[in-house]
Structures are given as structure tokens and as C-alpha cells.
Image (spheres, helix red, strand yellow):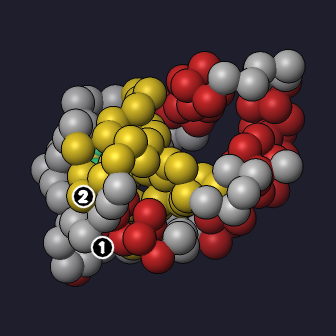
Amino acid sequence: MTDTEFLDDLKSRCLALIDGEDDAIAIMATLAGELYHSVEGFDWVGFYRVTAPQMLKIGPYQGGHGCLQIPFDRGVCGAAARQAQTQLVDDVDAFPGHIACASSTRSELVVPCFNRQGEVFAVLDIDSDQPAFFTKAHQDFCEDLLATVFSR
Ligand code: SME
């Protein structure tokens, strides 16, 4: 199976698992579980939700404990929420303000989740213990999956 086939297959599985569900937390929990267990190298997968102005709070996740709150002006997650743009970080030590919830994390992909009004209401954070683990294909996959699930 090629990487593309693998990610296409993973997207189909994710969509099948949440078919008919419209509760955001139920969807986040299901996606976090499926992504974490499907991809070796995804060592932490979870969502942070915008629960107050300029503030993210932990949502459903798989992996070790994450920080409970992240202000928009801190960390990779904060940057993704503030800029409403995906952050693909090959080396977390080189990212100013990176928050080390786990000292084993080496690289990180954080993708904003937009609601149907086009507002960021959460971010998906995926961390890897391997440096430069994430590819443009991973980024495209996550952006496409989240748009399909939350924005359309
Ligand atoms: N590293 C993230 C914080 C969240 S955890 O790693 C689970 C960041 O810098 O935003």
C-alpha cells in the first residue's frame, strides 16, 4: 500500500466511524483514537478547543497528559489558532514558545478546525517523538479530513 492509499483508507475509516454523528466532542474523541492507533509515529493526538477569547483548553486526546490550557500567544497550538493556519514544525526546539508537554516530542503538526462560519473553534495537535516526522501529505490529509468533518 502506498502512503497515499494508506491515508485515503484512513480517511474513509474515520468518516465511517463518525457517520451520522454531529456532536463535536464525540467526533474529536473518535478521530483522536483512530489517528493515534493507526499511524506509527503519531505519538500524541488530540484536540484543543477555543473555550474563551484567545484561550485553548484540552479536549479529547490519546497519549500522555497534555497541558490543560494554552493561550493563543503561546506554543505551536496557540500559533495555529491565532494565525488560523497549519503549523508544521520539524524541530520543536527551534520553535519560539513551544510548550513541551512531553520532553520526548521532537516534531509537531497542528491544524486549525474551522466551523461552518469559517471561525477557528479548535485545533488538532499531533506530536511525534521522531524529528521532522510530518510531511505535506500528512498536512493535506488532516486539513482535508477536518474540513470534511467540521466545515462542510
Ligand atoms: N506542544 C504544544 C502543546 C501541547 S502538547 O504537546 C500536547 C504546543 O507547543 O502548542
Task: Depth check: give the residue in front, 17 or 122.
Answer: 122
Vertical comparison of 78 with 58: above or below: below
Answer left or right for 18 relative to 77: right
Task: Depth check: give the residue in front, 10 or 67.
Answer: 67
Corner quadrant of residue 57: top left
Question: Which percent across, then down, holds residue 92?
Answer: 26, 69
Question: Which percent across, then down, holds residue 66?
Answer: 25, 37
Vertical comparison of 108 with 90: above or below: above
Vertical comparison of 116 with 23: above or below: below
Q: Which residue is mark 2?
A: 71
Answer left or right for 68 relative to 14: left
Disc number for residue 91: 1
Corner quadrant of residue 4: bottom right
The residue shown at (26%, 30%) is: 64
The residue shown at (44%, 27%) is: 60
The residue shown at (64%, 72%) is: 136
Residue farthest to the front?
A: 53
Task: Depth check: give the residue in front, 129 or 29.
Answer: 29
Q: Could you tell me which secondary element the residue under label 2 belongs to? A: strand
The residue shown at (69%, 62%) is: 118
Mark 2 or 1: in front is 2
Is residue 6 in sight in this rendering?
A: no
Q: Badge 1: few (under 14), some or many (20 or more) residues near its Cα, within 10 Å?
A: some
**Mark 2 to mark 1 CA distance (whole Å):** 21 Å
Is residue 55 in sight in this rendering?
A: yes
Amino acid type, callout 2:
Pro
Question: Which percent across, then down, holds residue 76?
Answer: 33, 65
Q: Could you tell me which secondary element the residue under label 1 belongs to? A: loop
Q: Is the C-beta of the residue carrying label 1 under 8 Å from the nearest atom of ligand 1?
A: no
Amino acid type, callout 1:
Asp
Q: Earlier in the sequence, mark 2 or mark 1?
A: 2
